[in-house]
Image (cartoon, rainbow, N blue to C red):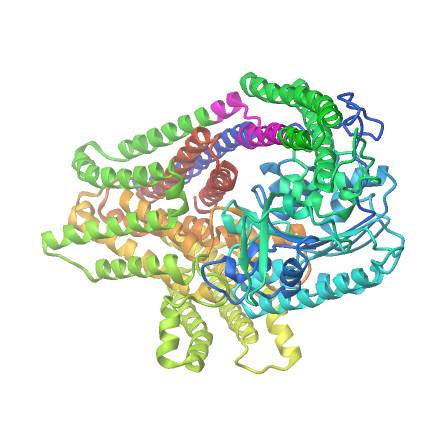
């Protein structure tokens, strides 16, 4: 009768544990919610606007907004325009294929130095498109929390140049990226928006802009024209910078810009519609070599701005532009490049158009961009009043000083209002320093106005130099004030709520302690008193596993190690493997599994370093890459065929392994045949999809469209159907009649087979290789765990303590797979192209779901779903000889607790890291994205463990 009693107790004990996992999930959710509310707060956005009748009352020369200097403005935005797309290749150490393609801009900058200039424009991270457009138009710094809105941009209510243009009666025409109409739905007189999120579509948006751009230049129904191209951004995301589609796009843009410039020049004669027009060609951000952006690396924040005025300013403009960075281009012509902050764009454009500066703008009117407009040199038009006639340069400096005076007053007004309205505001010490700079600058301004007039009348030419020097000092004083506040805002802008951050961190620490205590308590409860020696034998393994976890967690306190997290995880995984090899060699029982696992680690390291990681940019490999070496030896034709066929061959091997595994692991007949049939179909569709994408095989257009669009959808549908059938079989099927080990094995295998095809097709052609690494890694870890039990004679003792080293190795392998597949803990590490596999049009829920599966599939979903196999193989031998009840369910709970604890420890240390580094220069470019990825990963892990505990128990 004892056996039936034990059988009756098993479900009760197993089903009580999901409550523990749910409680852990709830505590982690609350902790992350509180910490996020304290850490990722946006700055206070003031619902205040500048008005035309605002008066500074500083002095007669600084009492109102600057008058307009240009009549019309053409802004051509080339999304993700890298600086080296525009600047001549001679400015860089090595010429690359994508350089010197925008020849028309380089030629203008060389031939018309007084009216054309190339700028290196520096953006503030994060460099997602929404935040850059918002910062460009408001003149403020981007806020990190807006990253989540990049896929559904809300209308901007903060004061911005678009609002000021509309209030000033300026007519605005927009064409291109539909993000503009989402941000400013009621600000355009005419708009031609096109959907922007289908990154595989390089031409629809650009063709729409081309259709309307040139005809609009001949019309007189606008004052500001915005044309936003997306082809370069999409080409980068899909193919990388060093790719043929990218070069073709740049060459297309060169022709378009040449047509635009020719049109503007032909209509810029006296009395023409573009006599006083200014052309700006600019990027909103840069991109890495593999086409990503969102972080704060130099490639991402360095973009370009090209300015050209058909009306040439006087020669004195060269004194303002300077020649700090000049070089000769490929044709031997000198080209000079200036540097500006994108933060200055909004206020500079406002000054040129003569509209009120946005209330929250904290930029400075850029002197070089301001000087390129011939209107700023027109003394009569600019209403320059002085005691005596000034030369061109002195008059311009006076005009620019007046613009900076209004600029400084506007920023000081914003500082005062922000400090009084914001909950936290800026520190008193910083505010006092900035206020002191402003007071000195304004006092000097009043004195400069008096002294320049008096000195000119009294002394003549000798003191005109002194007056000019006084103006330059005044310009420097205003610039110092504006730059100081911009630096203050960059370093202390975000309002951290330390109480909420502290409570969230405390909850995480308490949760980790509780999880650790629960795990220890479970081990002691399920370990009979006559078998305590087994627990003693586990202590060295437990200490080693804890050391690995602690080292990895501690490495996250350094920004350098965060950047190389994949290598750190691979190093620790290799260390555990080498330690096992050393132990086996000393004992004289070295096994083949240890050798295979060591080779797998070496291959994984090369994969992270070169082959599949995001460090290999675009569709081509570097000359040091192993693929390039193979291509050099055997020829490019062989290489192309080899690279096209190898993924499909690997896929066939993966399919064979999965089918053989399913046939032996799934014991319920209907579920087995349904899963196996679905698996065969899914892998066939994946192979068809990859073959359709290949350029080596010729396909009829209809067949190719089926392979590219319909095949992935069939894979998704089969996976969803298998998932539903698996759950229904668990709820209503006869699986409960199976023994516990067989039941868990069947359910786990069905779940893995349901998820894996979708994850594999989203990973692209690298998916089959990653699947093989995952399968071989799991096999090695399980085999080594069985060897470990045999060596310590745990199978004879009957211990039900899970091996912590195996769980730690599985966790480290999951981290390696994340980086191996080209992911990265920053927003530019998201593989946006995966979200559109099988689809052409953007839908936020559908594409967001696919992007999430691609991002967390091999690093979280598959590893958590595979945990039962570690538990099952751990207790297969033990359960036969052990007298301990519920050994299987106890080990299963331990494995899930260990894995969740490892993830929680890592996330807790990440939270500690971002708390310490919250004022670090890279907080928004590196530490905050890392926190977001780890926090989402922890919650996803907890959720999957909760569902798994309900599913298996």
Q: Nearer the viewer, residue 574 or 328?
A: 328
| Residue 230 falls in image quadrant | bottom right
**Magenta includes 487?**
yes
Image location of residue 468, percent across then percent down: 67, 33
Q: How many marks?
A: 0
Image location of residue 168, percent across then percent down: 85, 38
Whether residue 41 is visible: no
Per the picture, the main secondary structure of the magenta-coloured stretch is helix
| Location of residue 605 with respect to 121 vertically, above or below | below
| Residue 154 falls in image quadrant | top right
**Magenta includes 919?**
no
Image location of residue 187, percent across then percent down: 82, 43
Whether residue 348 is visible: yes
| Location of residue 252 with respect to 41 vertically, above or below | below
Q: Please state if 663 lies on the left or on the right of 481 as rendered.
A: left
Q: Nearer the viewer, residue 83 or 196?
A: 83
Q: Please state if 164 lies on the left or on the right of 2 as rendered.
A: right
Residue drawn at 85 percent across, 59 percent down:
269
Q: Nearer the viewer, residue 659 or 375?
A: 375
| Location of residue 475 with respect to 311 vertically, above or below | above
Residue drawn at 19 percent across, 39 percent down:
540
Image location of residue 702, percent across then percent down: 66, 78
| Location of residue 522 with respect to 341 vertically, above or below | above
Q: Please state if 669 lies on the left or on the right of 388 as rendered.
A: left
Q: Quadrant of the C terminus?
A: top left
The magenta-colored residue range is 476-504
Q: Please state if 878 lies on the left or on the right of 217 as rendered.
A: left
């Amino acid at each position: 009768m004892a056996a039936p009693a034990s059988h009756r107790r098993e479900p009760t004990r197993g089903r009580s544990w999901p409550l523990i996992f749910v409680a852990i999930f709830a505590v982690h959710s609350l902790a992350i919610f509180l910490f996020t509310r304290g850490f990722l707060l946006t700055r206070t956005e003031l619902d205040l606007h500048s008005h035309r009748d605002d008066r500074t009352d500083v002095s007669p020369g600084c009492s109102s907004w600057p008058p307009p200097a240009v009549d019309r403005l053409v802004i051509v935005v080339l999304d993700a325009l890298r600086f080296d797309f525009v600047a001549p290749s001679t400015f860089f150490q090595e010429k690359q294929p994508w350089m010197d393609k925008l020849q028309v801009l380089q030629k203008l900058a060389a031939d018309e130095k007084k009216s054309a200039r190339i700028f290196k424009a520096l953006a503030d991270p994060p460099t997602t498109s929404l935040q850059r457009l918002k910062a460009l138009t408001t003149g403020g710094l981007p806020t990190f929390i807006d990253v989540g809105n990049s896929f559904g941009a809300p209308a901007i209510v903060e004061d911005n140049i678009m609002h000021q243009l509309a209030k000033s009666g300026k007519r605005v025409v927009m064409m291109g990226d539909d993000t503009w109409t989402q941000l400013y739905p009621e600000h355009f007189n005419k708009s031609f928006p096109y959907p922007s999120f289908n990154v595989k579509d390089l031409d629809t948006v650009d063709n729409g802009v081309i259709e309307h751009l040139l005809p609009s230049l001949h019309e007189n129904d606008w004052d500001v024209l915005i044309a936003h191209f997306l082809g370069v951004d999409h080409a980068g995301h899909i193919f990388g910078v060093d790719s043929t589609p990218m070069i073709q796009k740049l060459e297309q843009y060169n022709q378009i810009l040449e047509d635009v410039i020719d049109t503007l020049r032909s209509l810029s004669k006296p009395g023409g519609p573009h006599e006083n027009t200014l052309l700006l060609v600019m990027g909103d951000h840069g991109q890495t070599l593999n086409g990503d952006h969102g972080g704060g690396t130099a490639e991402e924040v360095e973009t370009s701005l090209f300015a050209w005025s058909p009306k040439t300013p006087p020669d004195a403009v060269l004194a303002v532009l300077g020649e700090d960075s000049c070089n000769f281009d490929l044709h031997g012509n000198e080209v000079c490049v200036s540097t500006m902050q994108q933060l200055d764009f909004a206020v500079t454009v406002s000054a040129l158009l003569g509209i009120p500066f946005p209330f929250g703008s904290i930029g400075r009117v850029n002197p070089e961009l301001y000087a390129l407009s011939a209107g700023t040199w027109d003394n009569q038009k600019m209403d320059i009043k002085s005691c005596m006639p000034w030369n061109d340069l002195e008059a311009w400096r006076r005009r620019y000083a007046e613009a900076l005076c209004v600029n400084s007053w506007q920023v000081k007004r914003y500082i005062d209002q922000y400090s009084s309205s914001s909950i936290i505001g800026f520190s008193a010490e910083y505010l006092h320093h900035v206020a002191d700079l402003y007071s000195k600058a304004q006092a000097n301004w009043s004195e400069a106005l008096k002294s320049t007039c008096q000195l000119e009348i009294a002394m003549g030419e000798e003191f005109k130099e002194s007056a000019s020097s006084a103006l330059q000092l005044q310009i420097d004083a205003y610039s110092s004030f504006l730059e100081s506040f911009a630096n203050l805002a960059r370093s202390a802008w975000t309002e951290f709520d330390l109480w909420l951050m502290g409570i969230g961190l405390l909850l995480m620490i308490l949760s980790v302690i509780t999880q650790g205590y629960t795990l220890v308590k479970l081990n002691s409860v399920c370990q009979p008193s006559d078998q305590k020696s087994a627990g003693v034998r586990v202590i060295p393994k437990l200490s080693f596993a804890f050391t690995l976890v602690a080292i990895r967690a501690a490495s996250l306190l350094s920004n350098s190690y965060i950047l190389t997290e994949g290598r750190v995880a691979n190093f620790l995984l290799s260390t555990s493997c080498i330690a096992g090899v050393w132990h086996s060699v000393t004992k004289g029982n070295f096994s083949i599994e240890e050798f295979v696992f060591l080779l797998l680690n070496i291959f994984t390291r090369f994969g992270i370093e070169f082959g599949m990681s995001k460090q290999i940019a675009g569709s081509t490999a570097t000359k040091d890459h192993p693929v390039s070496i193979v291509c050099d030896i055997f020829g490019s034709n062989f290489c192309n065929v080899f690279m096209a066929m190898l993924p499909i061959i690997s896929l066939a091997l993966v399919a064979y392994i999965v089918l053989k595994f399913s046939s032996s692991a799934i014991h319920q007949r209907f579920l087995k045949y349904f899963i196996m049939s679905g698996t065969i179909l899914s892998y066939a569709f994946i192979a068809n999809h990859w073959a359709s994408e290949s350029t080596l095989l010729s396909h009829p257009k209809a067949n190719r469209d089926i392979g590219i669009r319909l095949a992935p959808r069939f894979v998704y549908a089969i996976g969803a159907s298998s998932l539903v059938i698996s759950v229904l079989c668990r709820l209503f099927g006869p699986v409960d009649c199976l023994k516990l080990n067989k039941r868990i094995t069947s359910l786990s295998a069905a779940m893995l087979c349901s998820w894996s095809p979708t994850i594999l097709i989203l990973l692209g052609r690298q998916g089959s290789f990653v699947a093989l690494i995952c399968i071989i890694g799991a096999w090695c870890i399980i085999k080594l765990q069985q060897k470990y039990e045999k060596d310590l004679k745990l199978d004879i003792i009957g211990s039900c303590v899970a091996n912590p080293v195996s769980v730690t190795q599985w966790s480290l392998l999951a981290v390696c797979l994340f980086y191996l597949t080209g992911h990265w803990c920053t927003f530019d590490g998201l593989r946006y192209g995966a979200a559109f596999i099988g689809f052409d049009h953007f839908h936020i829920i559908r594409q967001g779901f696919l992007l999430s599966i691609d991002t967390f599939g091999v690093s979280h979903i598959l590893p958590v779903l595979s945990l039962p196999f570690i538990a099952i193989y751990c207790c297969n031998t033990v359960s036969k000889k052990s007298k301990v009840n519920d050994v299987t369910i106890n080990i299963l709970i331990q494995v899930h607790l260990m894995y969740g604890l490892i993830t929680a420890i890592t996330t807790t240390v990440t939270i500690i890291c971002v708390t310490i580094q919250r004022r670090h220069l890279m907080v928004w470019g590196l530490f905050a994205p890392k926190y977001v990825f780890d926090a989402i990963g922890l919650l996803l892990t907890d959720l999957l463990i909760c569902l798994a505990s309900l599913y298996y128990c």
